[in-house]
Amino acid sequence: MALPPASAPSAKGPASWTRTGLGIVALCFAINMADGVDVTILSFIAPRLQTEWNIDSGTMGNLFSAGLIGMAIGGMFIAPLADRLGRRAVILAALCLMSVGMLASSFAASVPMLFGMRVIVGSGIGTVLAAMAALAAESAPPAQRNLAVGVVQAGYPFAAVFTGLIVAHALPIHGWQAMLLGAAVLTAVLLPAAWLVLPRATPAIGSGSSGDEAPAAGKVGQLFAPELRARTIALWCAVFFGLMVLYFIVSWIPKLSIAAGLSETDGIYAGALYNLGAFIGTMAMSFLALRVPLGKLVPAMLTCAGVAMVVFGSIAMPVWLTLLVAFMIGVLLQGGYNGVWPIAAGAYPGEVRATGVGWAIGVGRGGAVIGPMLGGYLMAANAPLPALFGAYCVPLLICAGAAFLVERYKV
């Protein structure tokens, strides 16, 4: 049943929580869970896919990068349309892209076809991430916008934990095609829910009294207007260097855990615990943001994540303690980094919010590609584990400082 359209949020947000606002945030959480499934499922089916198609790790790496390319396209070129056409239309279109791409992926018979479909899936994900951050912020009371955006971000790691567990059980029985088909069905189910719940009202564009005075929505140039330039540059630095570290850890945590002394099985558990920590850390950040300014909370969590990374790579520990530190890295790193998105959503006025967040996502994909690639080169060169983790503490600290500056420039 559709929620009452009369309570649709305004560009400035409601004075208090409404049924529509709560429904929108819950829906965005569910959509972000679907994102988590669509992104991580490829990594879980990769060994089976490589065996059946007889493809090497380099080709598999290209398939991984296809999704990141798509996210950049969606975030930079499709998501800004949400500032013109409204959040509803763009989110529905993005869900269609994700559903069609995942469905076609399950029938892919060659690497080029699967690559193309992963680009389409990534385009939908990059689009919906930006539009959801803007919509969640606009649906919440002003004092709780950071909480709303943070809760939405928690959907991704929450889904990642269970995706691995389900695929580990079902893959040997049903095969990798069925896994992709299941992800497509899950995403498609969200389409009617989004159609019913998302408000039909288009956010107000501009504040002038006439069309000539109102700024043109979705224009990238507006992000570099004098009053926005500094926070845009700082935000782009935060997401670029943050995703550089985040994707390094997400991509290599099982292998890094084995290098730290764990068995292969325990290394997989370390990856699962990291994602569980990421969910708990994101939720904790969301609620702490009600009391602690994000400009202080995010840098503090990221700095502590750097300490945990150094401990993980430098100190020989028993298995239980190594797993605990992996969990804490998830809490602090992903929990802290996901605080960047509430900062991003609050950095721009409503008429350019989706454009600003979308371009930040697109720029960040560069860091997401470089992070795992650089880590692979360093490991291939037999870099000591302490040096490897120490090297990634540098971009992590840059991310922390840039997040602090975004909040400072808003004042």
Image (cartoon, rainbow, N blue to C red):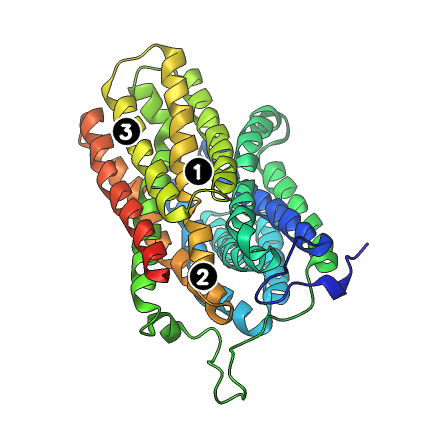
Which residue lies at the image location 50% right of the left edge and 44% below the top edge? 290
Marked residue nearer the N-terminal end (2 or 1): 1
Q: Residue 111: horizontal and vertical position, in percent?
A: 45, 47
Q: Find residue 180 and report its image quarter.
A: top right
Which three-letter amino acid code belongs to the residue tagged 2?
Gly
The numbered disc on residue 335 is 1
| Up-down relation of residue 209 to residue 271 (above or below) | below
Q: Residue 284: horizontal and vertical position, in percent?
A: 49, 35
Asked if residue 167 shows in the view, the reply is yes
Would you name the residue on which mark 3 appears?
307
Q: Secondary structure at mark 3?
A: helix
- Quarter of the image with the N terminus in it: bottom right
**Closer-to-camera residue (17/175):** 17
Asked if residue 52 shows in the view, the reply is no
Which residue lies at the image location 47% right of the left edge and 31% below the top edge? 275
Which three-letter amino acid code belongs to the residue tagged 1?
Gly
Would you name the residue on which mark 2 appears?
358
Which residue lies at the image location 73% right of the left edge and 53% below the top edge? 19
- Quarter of the image with the C terminus in it: bottom left
Image side of residue 141 versus residue 48, left or right: right
Mark 2–mark 3 distance (CA, rounded to whole Å): 31 Å
Mark 3–mark 1 distance (CA, rounded to whole Å): 15 Å
Q: How busy is the neighbourhood of tag 1: few (under 14 within 10 Å), some, or many (20 plus)?
A: many
Circles 2 and 3 in contact, beta carbons < 8 Å: no
| Up-down relation of residue 336 to residue 221 (above or below) | above
